[in-house]
Image (cartoon, coloured by chain):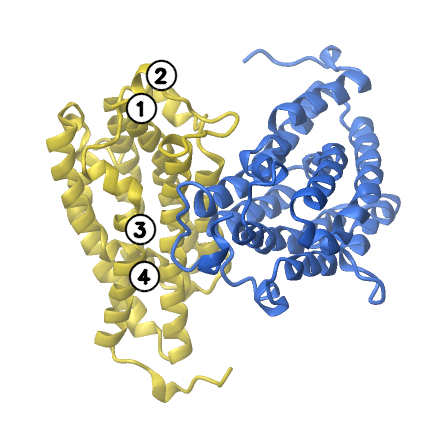
Chain colours: A yellow, B blue
Amino acid sequence: MTPVQDQDLVTPAALESRLRAIGAERYHHRHPFHQLMHEGKLTHGQLQAWALNRYYYQSAIPIKDAIILSRSENPAFRRAWRKRIIDHDGDGTDPGGIEKWIRLAQATGLDREQVTSKRGILPGVRYAVNAYFDLVSKRSFLEAVASSLTELFSRDLIALRVDRIREHYPWLSGGLAYFDARLTQAPEDATIALAWVTEHAGTRVEQDLVLGALRAKCDILWAQLDALYFAYVEPGWPPPGAFRPAAEDVTA
Amino acid sequence: MTPVQDQDLVTPAALESRLRAIGAERYHHRHPFHQLMHEGKLTHGQLQAWALNRYYYQSAIPIKDAIILSRSENPAFRRAWRKRIIDHDGDGTDPGGIEKWIRLAQATGLDREQVTSKRGILPGVRYAVNAYFDLVSKRSFLEAVASSLTELFSRDLIALRVDRIREHYPWLSGGLAYFDARLTQAPEDATIALAWVTEHAGTRVEQDLVLGALRAKCDILWAQLDALYFAYVEPGWPPPGAFRPAAEDVTA
């Protein structure tokens, strides 16, 4: 390996362009599970499995953001970042993202208790989410912040998904408040994170760490859908102990 | 939940019986990937993917055992447990399990450097193995030790595998030294761990922790094969960045 020199530092615009190229290749909008969803080809039971398993991810988000908060010694950074925790946990009156996700899961026919107990979550999903904890705990603070940059790509995916759910699964349309909120929250958060990362990645080595963190986060999202697809679509083998949809919900 | 009373403590024989029942249901000898392997139905490329990915697990074993060592304050326990590290790391002269696994991977046609670099490992395999580190680091010491009890079941699986590899994949027969060693090492290790767990699980609650730790470990092994099956058998979609066998190696 030849040492990378700081004169190789790319411009902010070039860094953003490289981040967006990673998203185009690796973000989970390309995953076959999402493609089936958007084509209206998922069964009721498969949508339940998706809502149940993604609850595990949703419930982890404020915890991972609290880990990031705990690693910052800068009050201004912490003030900006804490918005994320409020968005997901709510203020005790208006529901936050986790509560809205529970309502989405309920709209698929799952019981609240079944969802919040986290029983039946696929081990592959648990491990991927826990890898996100590892990333924000153990890698550099810069990488922890950069791992949030998948939010650069989420608005387009969410807009498409909301549209396609209303078209193909109208019975689920009442459960979409989570996505409505994220349409504005995610781009705001992404703008803040991108500006911070751009400012603080002052060497080419650090810029490469930023790119690597985004790739790692894309892997974490992708692996969750791999586990769902394997267990509930093809070949359709949920592992011992995992959620099993009611028999009538398996076929479209 | 009604509190569990210590008079519900099961006998050592009953505890072992319950452990063996978990193995019968959840150990990865039942996984379809292993079943294909033993029926001679895996392609050369699929065996490469298996050897490459399992290297990540093999290389993690002495690290997880060192974590367990680091949590024991008992020199007698540490003396007994350190044998595991020597078995896998070797003594610098005779090869240990990791070196033997590299040679197995080489027998499938992979380069040593490709294997030891850990490039191309499936994220799902990484996450599952890292969940093993979490288990032995963060759960109780009793659970950390109990998670090794899958070794109660490994001899039968290894004996079958060696037999079937010699039958169906004779070109791989020269790479089986790893398994030859494990045929005696694993049962010795399991006997020590089972005796220790039986002695130290002094309440029903602790016995249930032991059973839960074995289930969790079975999930970790199972999830690795789910990821392999999904990426390389059916539907056969390795995620971005993962190992891809040469085209001529994909079909049997």
Nearer the N terminus, badge 3 or badge 2?
3
Asked if the residue under mark 3 is in contact with the one under mark 4, i.e. CB atoms within 8 Å, the reply is no
Q: Where does residue B34 sit, x and y in percent of width and height?
A: 60, 38
Residue drawn where x is 14% and y is 28% of the image:
A173
Q: Chain of mark 4?
A: A
Q: Which sits earlier in the primary sequence, circle 2 or circle 1?
A: 1
Q: Residue at x 37, y 60 (%)?
A: A215
In the displayed structure, does residue B176 sit left or right of residue A92?
right
Q: Are marks 3 and 2 on the same chain?
A: yes
Q: Earlier in the sequence, mark 3 or mark 1?
A: 1
Amino acid on which the number 3 mark rests in the picture: Arg
Mark 4 vs 1, N-terminal side: 1
Placement of A149 over or under A29, stated as above or below: below
Residue under numbered circle 3: A82
Residue B220 in percent (x, y) is at 57, 39
- The residue that disc 2 covers is A246
Q: Tell me the crowding category of disc 4: few under 14, some 14 to 19, or many 20 or more residues within 10 angstroms, Cα based.
A: some
Q: Secondary structure at mark 3?
A: helix
Say which chain tag 3 marks. Answer: A
Disc 3 and disc 1 on one polypeptide chain: yes
| Kind of residue at disc 2 | Ala
What's the amino acid at mark 4? Phe
Q: Residues within 10 Å of mark 3 (few under 14, many from 20)?
A: some
Which is more toward the observer, B16 or A142?
B16
Question: Disc 3 and disc 1: Cα gap in Å?
Answer: 35 Å
SS for dot 4:
helix
Q: Which residue is mark 1?
A: A45
Report, in whole angstroms, how far the alpha carbon at label 3 lies from the one at label 2: 40 Å
Q: Nearer the viewer, mark 4 or mark 1?
A: 1
